[in-house]
Amino acid sequence: MSVIEKITSESLINLENNYGAHNYHPLPVVLKRGEGVFVWDINEKKYYDFLSAYSAVNQGHCHPKIVNAMVEQAQTLTLTSRAFYNDKLGIYEEYVTKYFGFDKVLPMNTGAEAVETALKITRKWAYEVKGIPEHQAQIIVCDGNFHGRTTTIISFSNDENARKNFGPYTDGFIKIPYNDIEALETILKSTQNIAGFLVEPIQGEAGVYTPSDDYMMRAKDLCNRYNVLFIADEIQTGIARTGSLLAVCGNCTCQNKCERQETYATPDVLILGKALSGGAYPVSAVLANDAIMNVIKPGQHGSTFGGNPIAAAVAMAALSVVDEEHLIQNARKLGNLFRDKLNEYISTSSIATLVRGRGLLNAIVINDTEQSDTAWNICMALRDNGLLAKPTHGNIIRFAPPLVMNEEQLLDCVSIIIKTLKTFEK
Ligand SMILES: *Cc1c(COP(=O)(O)O)cnc(C)c1O
């Protein structure tokens, strides 16, 4: 790196530091271009992207089909608001509901908005269909959850950083341990007025905590039994990331695409975001059947940008890429290979203690305290070696490359990771 180039990189970081709110702590690398599984920094250094913008870029960077759909629509009609109909929304709504096997969709933009939407639908359903007395509805959530950053959502987070001094908090949420089916049953048995159970099929932000194989199915059965909505937040885990269309493993299209039939569970309310646009545009959605979705009437919920024609065109292109390029099958195959290779290394390692995950949503746990900077330093060394990843919680590093990766590239990445870990062995 020449001195001039280094100054440029630093100066761009300084601009963010000086003029942007300090609500993130990025790895120091300034990217300017992406294609498929690769990104390039402003000095033309090439990296494997092993984060995929938190699994938004499942279809790979700047996928031509998705970009073309976006550009074409941007040149035709960008936004009408929902005050009028547009010629793309209905077509998209039919496409996305058939794709995931639900009667209806409510389109939004960001993940947090879609979670908020799901919570509002659940409460309204509780009062108008289930018959819970007004203002009494409770929604069960899990310890260690991550569902976004709005005031209501952080009200039921356990992350002190996300919560502290943002109160007063929204009422109506009960926390139980994750992956603990008895805890769910106990609360359902003992508590009145439960409207829903909001859960991530794998807790991504918490460190890729992967529950037992039957957790989703058993949770869904319990929800059925107690007439409680099973709400799956698949914003990070959905759309092929974990080697099935949805990580809860359910729904009609998934039955054709997924091999994990034994853990089948269909959510009552499905929340999608991130890869719904392949990372090209903010697109999120809540899907549910009529008995639930029809509680929402005109004027009761909305978003100026939700369901705009660009989002509709982009999302259809992004979902079609998942099928055409067999991303589910690829994520499953490469995920198994990745964990096999890393397990082999970890069995002799003192710095990495375990690898966990499903499909291409994985994490390794670093043998140091949560407060240590070892994981951060490993990510810095990975960066120097041409691979970008980031610690989630202190000593955990998430590995989630775009799903368009091929086997040769994955093996190349495995060797970069192992080579880097070796320099940290004690
Ligand atoms: C990213 C994420 C969200 C929030 O999505 P935003 O688009 O950042 O608002 C919610 N839930 C899960 C599981 C996520 O991974």
Image (tube, rainbow, N blue to C red):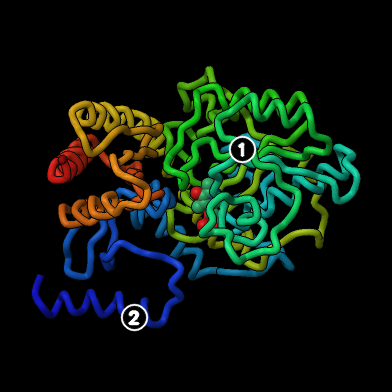
Tell me where residue 379 appears, x and y as whole percent: 25, 52
In the foreground, 277 or 338: 338
Q: Are marks 2 and 1 in contact (CB under 8 Å)?
A: no
Are there few (<14), some (14-19), or many (20+) residues within 10 Å of tag 2?
few
Point 56% across, 26% down: residue: 215
* Residue type (three-letter) at the residue carrying disc 2: Leu
Ligand 1 lies under 8 Å from the Cβ of mark 1: no
Which numbered disc, 2 or 1, marks the residue closer to the eye? 2
Say the numbered circle drawn on residue 339.
Answer: none
Point 15% across, 76% down: residue: 5
Relative to 339, 122 lies left or right: right
Ligand 1 lies under 8 Å from the Cβ of mark 2: no
Q: Which residue is mark 1?
A: 98
Relative to 345, 220 lies left or right: right
Residue 127 vertical position relative to residue 331 in the rendered view, above or below: below
**Tag 1 secondary structure:** helix
Indicate the quadrant containing the N terminus: top left, top right, bottom left or bottom right.
Answer: bottom left
Tell me where residue 71 appears, x and y as whole percent: 44, 65
In the foreground, 354 or 403: 354
